[in-house]
Image: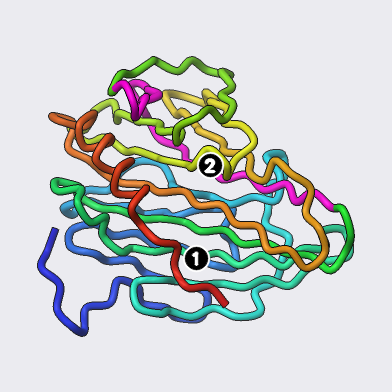
Amino acid sequence: MAERTPNDTAWTLRGTVAELRRGTFSGRIDVSRPDLGLRQVKLNGQELPGHLVAVQRQAEDSEWPLRVVDCYVRGDDLVASYKPTGDWPYSPQLYWSADPLDGADGVLGSLSLLMSVETHLLDTWPRITVSSQLACQELLQVNPEAGTTETLQPDQMIRPFTTPCCVLHRWGALPISYVEIMPTSDFLELTVRHDAGDAFRAEWQLFADFLEKGVIRRARLQTALLSRANDLQLALACCEAMDRRPLPLTT
């Protein structure tokens, strides 16, 4: 990745559309439509088919229902806050961070997504899904403790275990892999979908517990682009780096 300067900023925000550029990794996201995810993803000038980290109210919802009340760039973070509605009484904040993963040398690009949600009601259950859709040759679940992998099949469901859940996506025609890592306490289940063509979609359903009034619940998803040649070793290094990484400041 390119060397950073003191004034180096990952995000350029114009209205609700943010451009990400960190070294040779770039993309675009409209914070008013987080359900579309990070699109026009490029590495070394080559566009990577698919989209990353799309945020939906539920897996079956086709459009994000909440209005942006504030969005800004702070350092390497892009932050957006949303206004609750009558049928979805939650106040989410989304933090997209392009801060590099310390200790994971060889990562081609990285992005983390922190989702915070609270409500003014009693005993509610926010249903949020985060998904990435890629034209993949294969999807693998990585065991961070054993350093082993297991091939994931369409419609397979994964529940939280004792270690972070790590999923490795291998693009079909490119020497690039993509990894997603979620702490075991941050999600309810992960489901693999097979869409039209060769597109695979990994859906993370968040927040396994009810949300009490005044309580802020958070979930964090770490992603990274890796060289295919040593992607398993790099994925394991990303898991270790995520464990050491503090949560960003929130407001």
Of the image marks 1 and 2, the number of the one nearer the N terminus = 1
For this view, does 233 lie left or right of residue 203? left
> Relative to 30, is 41 above or below?
above
Q: Is residue 139 visible from the viewing direction of this image?
A: no
| Separation of marks 1 and 2 at Cα, in angstroms | 16 Å
Dot 2 amino acid type:
Ser
**Residue receiving disc 2:** 131
Dot 1: element: strand
- Could you tell me residue 146's position as x and y percent? 31, 21
Tell me if residue 35 is in the magenta stretch: no
> In the figure, 201 relative to 13: above or below?
above
The residue identified by callout 1 is 95
Helix, strand or loop for disc 2: strand
Residue type for callout 1:
Tyr
Q: Residues within 10 Å of mark 1 (few under 14, many from 20)?
A: many
- Read off the magenta span: 124-146
Residue 30 horizontal/vertical position (percent): 51, 66
Quarter of the view holding residue 191: top right
Q: Residue at x 74, y 44 (%)?
A: 209
Instruction: Identify which residue, 87 or 135, lies in the foreground.
Output: 87
Q: Depth check: give the residue in front, 194 or 101.
A: 101
Q: Is residue 155 left or right of residue 215?
A: left
Residue 127 lies in the magenta-colored region: yes
Task: Assess disc 2: are there few (<14), some (14-19) or many (≥20) residues with their C-alpha within 10 Å of its C-alpha.
Answer: many
Secondary structure character of the magenta stretch overall: strand
